[in-house]
């Protein structure tokens, strides 16, 4: 049912979604009722009854202490991520018959704590969203658990990919609920998609760019720090001003 309700405009959902979902739980609609819900969503978009106006005070609500602390911890995690990449990139060069790599064992503690603090910030972003945002909370849980697994076993490449993919779900949900701006979402997507795309393409052997040796690869992974920066900054700053509902008559 939540997928059908998601067809309605955001302003409508913020005002009526909880009551509407409760009604649907009591009286599950048949196929004809589902069509009526879709038709109502189209009508709500063509003839909006709920209009939004900016906060007349122009001042956003202050952030909660937990929210701000989680933001600073996330930013600290970003610093530790860079420290981990610098240590790993300067580790001893190990040459094997199949190639060479840097021994980054000394960076493991910084790597693990950085991912743990990223999970803290991500959970804070998920909890800051409206109650119906269950997908964001589920994604935050998946990302935190799988991200911790990746922190302990960094050779499990796809564990990291799953963790950051779930993080994108949290970020999109934050943008849809007006907790994040489009700029914040865009920066995070760049910080996730570009490094992971390069790692996937190079790791699959489809493209071997000259010069992407054991040193440059840490620069690519290090660029993921944008994720820590965006999440941390979004929590440290005051929450975006909440709009005030104003009901306008149907045209």
Image (spheres, helix red, strand yellow):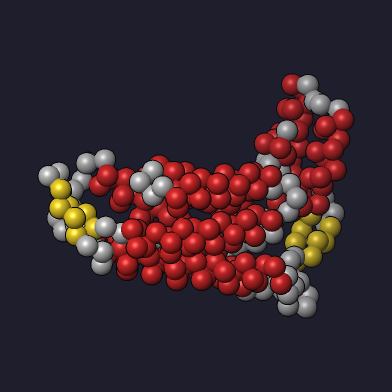
In this rendering, the answer to whether 58 lies above or below 102 is below
Residue 57, by quadrant, is bottom right
Residue name at image x 73 percent, y 27 percent: 35
Q: In which quadrant of the rendered image does the N terminus lie? A: top right
Residue name at image x 85 percent, y 43 percent: 19
* Pick the front one: 250 or 239: 239
* Pick the front one: 12 or 44: 12
Q: Is residue 46 visible?
A: no
Q: Position of residue 144 (x, y in %)?
A: 56, 50
Q: Position of residue 81 (x, y in %)?
A: 42, 65
In this rendering, the answer to whether 24 lies above or below 248 is above
* Pick the front one: 94 or 219: 94
Q: Residue pushed farthest left?
A: 97
Residue name at image x 74 percent, y 21 percent: 31
Q: Is residue 155 left or right of residue 205?
A: right
Residue 200, by quadrant, is top left
In this rendering, the answer to whether 26 lies above or below 196 is above
Q: How many marks?
A: 0
* Pick the front one: 58 or 195: 195
Q: Position of residue 111 (x, y in %)?
A: 42, 60
Residue name at image x 73 percent, y 74 percent: 62
Q: Is residue 47 left or right of residue 249?
A: left
Q: Position of residue 12 (x, y in %)?
A: 76, 49
Q: Is residue 198 visible?
A: yes
Q: Is residue 41 left or right of residue 156?
A: right
């Amino acid at each position: 049912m939540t997928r059908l309700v998601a067809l309605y405009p955001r302003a409508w959902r913020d005002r009526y979604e909880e009551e509407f979902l409760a009604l649907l739980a009591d009286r599950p609609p048949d196929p004809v009722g589902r069509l009526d819900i879709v038709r109502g969503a189209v009508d709500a978009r063509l003839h909006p009854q709920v209009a939004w106006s900016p906060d007349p005070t122009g001042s956003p609500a202050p952030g909660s202490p937990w929210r701000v602390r989680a933001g600073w911890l996330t930013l600290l995690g970003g610093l530790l991520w860079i420290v981990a990449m610098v240590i790993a990139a300067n580790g001893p060069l190990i040459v094997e018959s199949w190639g060479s790599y840097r021994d980054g064992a000394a960076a493991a503690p910084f790597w693990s704590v950085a991912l743990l603090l990223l999970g803290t910030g991500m959970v804070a972003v998920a909890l800051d969203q409206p109650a119906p945002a269950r997908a964001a909370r589920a994604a935050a849980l998946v990302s935190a658990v799988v991200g911790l697994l990746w922190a302990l076993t960094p050779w499990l490449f796809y564990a990291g990919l799953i963790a950051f993919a779930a993080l994108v779900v949290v970020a999109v949900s934050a943008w849809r609920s007006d907790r994040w701006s489009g700029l914040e979402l865009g920066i995070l997507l760049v910080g996730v998609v570009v490094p992971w795309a390069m790692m996937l393409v190079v790791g699959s052997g489809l493209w071997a760019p000259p010069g992407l040796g054991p040193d440059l690869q840490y620069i690519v992974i290090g660029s993921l720090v944008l994720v820590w920066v965006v999440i941390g900054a979004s929590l440290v700053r005051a929450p975006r001003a909440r709009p005030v509902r104003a009901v306008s008559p149907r045209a």
